[in-house]
Amino acid sequence: MADTGNRTLRLLSLLQTRRQWSGADLADRLGVSLRTLRRDVDRLREIGYPVEARPGVDGGYRLAPGAVLPPLVLDDEEAVALTVGLQAAAQTAVAGTGEASVRALTKVVQVLPARLRRRAEALVSVTTRGTWGSGPVVDPQVLTTVAEACRDTERLAFGYTDASGARTERLVEPSALVALGRRWYLVAHDTGRGDWRSFRLDRLTGPRPTGARFAPRRLPAESPEAFVRAGTDVRAGSYAVEAHVAAPAAVVRSRIGTWAAVEDDGDAACRVRMETDQLGWAAFALGTVGAGFTVESPPELRTLLAEWARRFDRAAAAR
């Protein structure tokens, strides 16, 4: 019985991670026969999960919208709070946390009843959140739509505005989302241009799943993040900041860690790396640590700090 219960929970988890599964794929993931899979699906239906089944070549199993979240894990109020919180986390574009928020958000929204979804959207629409700096804000609906297309290997159409302001319509095979610095990027194969591209999500409008599936291609880089970095590092206005800070990593991480990568460099020192298009923000972030630091790159930040130092000296000397 214990094995059956664990397998049922595993089945539920799989159904929440993809729009539709074929019976063969599910049975293979669970290590059971198709007959046992059908019994497990019936068991989920008995405890309240509306699992839909479609026969035929294009058929399979899917978890219908409106499934009730497990009551011992989340009640209705908690489900709304979780949705709003995940949307807020996704908007911050914090590396790691943001990606996990989008993955979790796609699962929650998929099974959230319509009445709760409306409540969550109402809360988001009237809530204003402050953020550090002036990084672009991405609509959570854009994030979730693109994330679902990546997950389902489904071609995606959208409007895109490039750095020069020119707007074009794109049809792509989406591969992955990357949170880099304070921005979100979509890595995809552009069918119109016949090559891989990275797209800033704050410049992307009206994403529309086409319903057409595709076979995943091999990315010409070791990882989606490496592909995005290769394209963004050479763009004007983007700075890779690195500094040595005379303070424990835990202290620095608690103050600016969500906006930078902080690594131990001895018992009472650490190394801070961040990417920004505004050096003033990097200077401010390092200054808030309250410890001595040395800028290793870029030289433009050292120049800016020298200018600030002269200005602050004059302000301190003024009577």
Image (cartoon, rainbow, N blue to C red):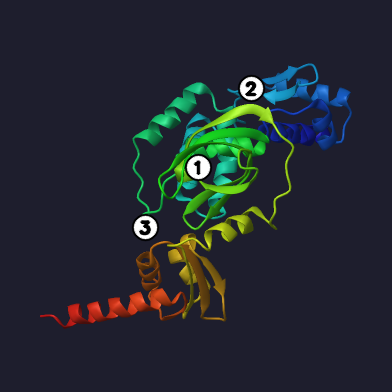
For marks 2 and 1, give the CA distance: 21 Å
> Residue under circle 3?
133
Query: Residue 199 at what x, y percent from top left?
Result: 53, 47
Q: Amino acid at mark 1?
A: Leu
Which image quadrant is residue 294 in? Answer: bottom left
> Residue under circle 2?
64
The C terminus appears in which quarter of the rendering?
Answer: bottom left
Q: Residues within 10 Å of mark 2 (few under 14, many from 20)?
A: some
Viewed as shown, does residue 274 lie left or right of 18? left
> Closer to the camera, 195 or 37?
195
Q: Amino acid at mark 3?
A: Gly
In the picture, the disc for residue 280 is none
Residue 53 vertical position relative to residue 206 in the rendered view, above or below: above
First-in-chain label (1 vs 3):
1
Residue 18 vertical position relative to residue 165 in the rendered view, above or below: above
Q: Amino acid at mark 2?
A: Ala
- Extreme residue toward the top, this view: 55
Is residue 83 shown to the viewer in this render? no
> Closer to the camera, 252 or 194?
194
First-in-chain label (3 vs 2):
2
- CB contact under 8 Å: marks 3 and 2: no
> Closer to the camera, 188 or 23?
188
Query: Residue 80 at what x, y percent from top left?
Result: 48, 33
Query: Residue 63 at what x, y percent from top left?
Result: 67, 25
Which image quadrant is residue 42 in? Answer: top right
Which residue is painted at 67% across and 28% down in the image?
212
Query: Residue 134 at what x, y percent from top left?
Result: 36, 54
